[in-house]
Amino acid sequence: MNLLECSVKDFVAATASKEPTPGGGAIAALTAATGVALAEMVANLTFDKKGYEDVQSDMKVLQEQAATIREEALELVQADANVFNTFMDALGLPQNTDEEKAKRTEALQQAYKDAANVPLKIGKISYGIFDLAYEAVTKGNKNLITDGAIAAINARAAVKSAFLNVRINLAGIKDANFVEEINSYMNDVESQLDKREEEILKFCKF
C-alpha cells in the first residue's frame, strides 16, 4: 500500500486494521508533517499582509524550511512502513544450519538498526519544527497564532512518538556503542521538549 497516495480515510482505516503497518512510526512522521504544515500555512498567510511588511523575508525562509521538512516527513511515513517489512523478511530467514543462523543474525541486526534509524530521523526533523513554530507565533499573522502553537504541540508529540519506536528497536541491537550514542542524543533532545513547547505556548495565554 502506497501510504502517500491513499486517502486520509483509507490511511486511518489501514492504521486501525489488523495489518502492522502503518504503525506508530508512520503516525509520528505524519504528525510531524501536519504540524510543520501549519507553520508553513502561517507563513503563506502572512505574505503581502498589511502590518507585516518587515517580516516578509523571514516568512519566506519559514515557508521554504517548513516545506522541506514537510516533504521529508511524508517520505518517512512510507519509509517506516518499508523498514518494518524489511525486518519481517530478516526474521523469516532460514536457520537450519550454522551458516544460515549467522546470516539471519547479521540480517536481523542490520534490520534493527535500520528500524531504529528511520524513527530517529523522524524525531530529528520533528525537533526542528520548534524553531519554525516559534517564528510563526512571534512574527507571523496574529490571527493564526494558535496554528503556530499547534505546530509546536505536534512537534513534541512526533518526537516522543518517534523516539519510543527507536528505543524498542535499540533493545534488540548488540552494538553497545551504537545504542549508547543514540540514547544519549535522544535523552538530550527529550530534556528540552517541555521548555521548547512552553516557550511557544506562552504566547497563547488567552
Image (spheres, rainbow, N blue to C red):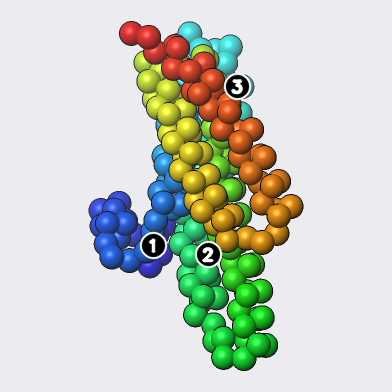
> Which mark is nearer the camera, 2 or 3?
2
Q: Position of residue 150 (x, y in %)?
A: 40, 27
Q: CA distance from mark 2 to mark 3?
A: 37 Å
| Tag 1–tag 2 contact (CB < 8 Å) | no
Q: Position of residue 50 (x, y in %)?
A: 46, 11
Mark identifier at residue 123? none
| SS at mark 1 in the image | loop
> Which mark is nearer the camera, 3 or 1?
1
Residue that numbered label 1 is attached to: 21
Mark identifier at residue 58? 3
What's the residue type where badge 2 is placed? Val
Answer above or below: position of 106 versus 37. Answer: below
Answer above or below: position of 48 versus 72. Answer: above
What's the residue type where badge 3 is placed? Asp
Which residue is rendered at x = 43% and y = 22% of the image? 149
| Tag 2–tag 3 contact (CB < 8 Å) | no
Answer above or below: position of 181 versus 109. Answer: above
| SS at mark 3 in the image | helix
Which residue is rendered at x = 34% and y = 59% of the image? 6
Question: Would residue 200 appear left or right of 182 to someone viewing this image?
Answer: left
Q: Nearer the viewer, residue 71 or 104?
A: 104
Residue that numbered label 2 is attached to: 83
Q: Residue furthest bottom?
A: 97
Q: Earlier in the sequence, mark 2 or mark 3?
A: 3
Tell me if residue 179 can be seen: yes
* Quarter of the image with the N terminus in it: bottom left
Q: Position of residue 162 (x, y in %)?
A: 50, 46
